[in-house]
Each structure stands twice: as structure tokens, then as C-alpha cells.
Image (spheres, rainbow, N blue to C red):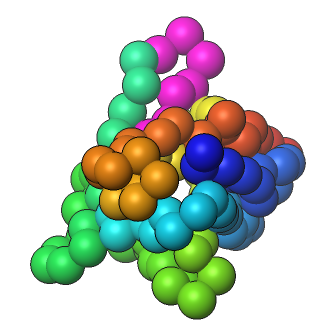
Amino acid sequence: QVQLVESGGGLVQPGGSLRLSCAASGSGFAINSVDWYRQAPGQERELVAVLPSGGDTFYAESVKGRFTASRDNVKNTVYLQMNSLKPEDTAVYYCKPKGYSPEAGRSLEVWGQGTLVTVSS
């Protein structure tokens, strides 16, 4: 069974920063890539970043230059650093890591529970 804990959201003023964390655990499970999504009130879910196992990281145009996705393989955790936050960044943010699970005998992709980011003065 893969366990996923997403954290780091909160209230921040415009121009501030937050770092979201998405930590996975389970027997032999290791994250090799992650998608980051957000959903603002009354709006559709938006893909904001993709951190692949290799190659270039994707960022939505709306966050490019302000958000940075990264990983810590030792901690089996992925991060989304968010700088220069704007009110329009207000949303629930979700991680969706993917990795191979020896327990399941296949690749798994699991949604985080979401963490609320509110950018307001």
C-alpha cells in the first residue's frame, strides 16, 4: 500500500513564497515522476508542472519563472517551490506522483489529498 502525504499550503501575501511537499512511502515504492495540478474556486483543474524521471520539466505558462519542481530521492519526496505568488495562484494544489510498486507488481499513479494555497493581503 502506497501512502502519500501532501503538505505546505497556507495563507501568504502577494509576492510571498511557499513550498509544497509530497512524500510517498510504501514497501519498495519510489517516485520517478510527478504531475502537479491546481484547481481554483469555480474553475477547472489545471496542470501546472510535470517533473519527469528524465528530461525537461514542464511548467504552465502562467507559473513559468515563478514555480520550480524538484525531488529528493533519499526522502522519496517531491517539491513545488512557489515564488512571487499572485492572488490568481489561489487554489487547491494536488500532487500526482508515479512510481513502480514491487508490492503491486506494476506502476502506480496516486493523487495527493490536496493542500490549499491562499494568496491574499
Of 31 and 88, which appears nearest the observer? 31
Quarter that holds the N terminus: top right
| Residue 11 x %, y % | 85, 48
Q: Is residue 45 visible?
A: yes
Residue 37 part of the magenta segment: yes
Of 87 and 115, which appears nearest the observer? 115
Query: Can you say whether 44 is above or below 23 in the image?
Result: above
Total labels: the figure holds 0
| Residue 7 x %, y % | 76, 54
| Residue 93 x %, y % | 59, 41
Q: Is residue 92 left or right of residue 10?
A: left
**Residue drawn where x is 47% and y is 16% of the image:** 43
**Residue drawn where x is 72% and y is 52% of the image:** 5
Farthest residue, direction left: 55
Q: Is residue 83 left or right of residue 38?
A: right
Of 110 and 46, which appears nearest the observer? 110
Farthest residue, direction top: 42
**Residue drawn where x is 54% and y is 84% of the image:** 72
Residue 56 part of the magenta segment: no
| Residue 65 x %, y % | 37, 72
Residue span colored magenta: 35-43
Q: Is residue 89 visible?
A: no
**Residue drawn where x is 44% and y is 66% of the image:** 31
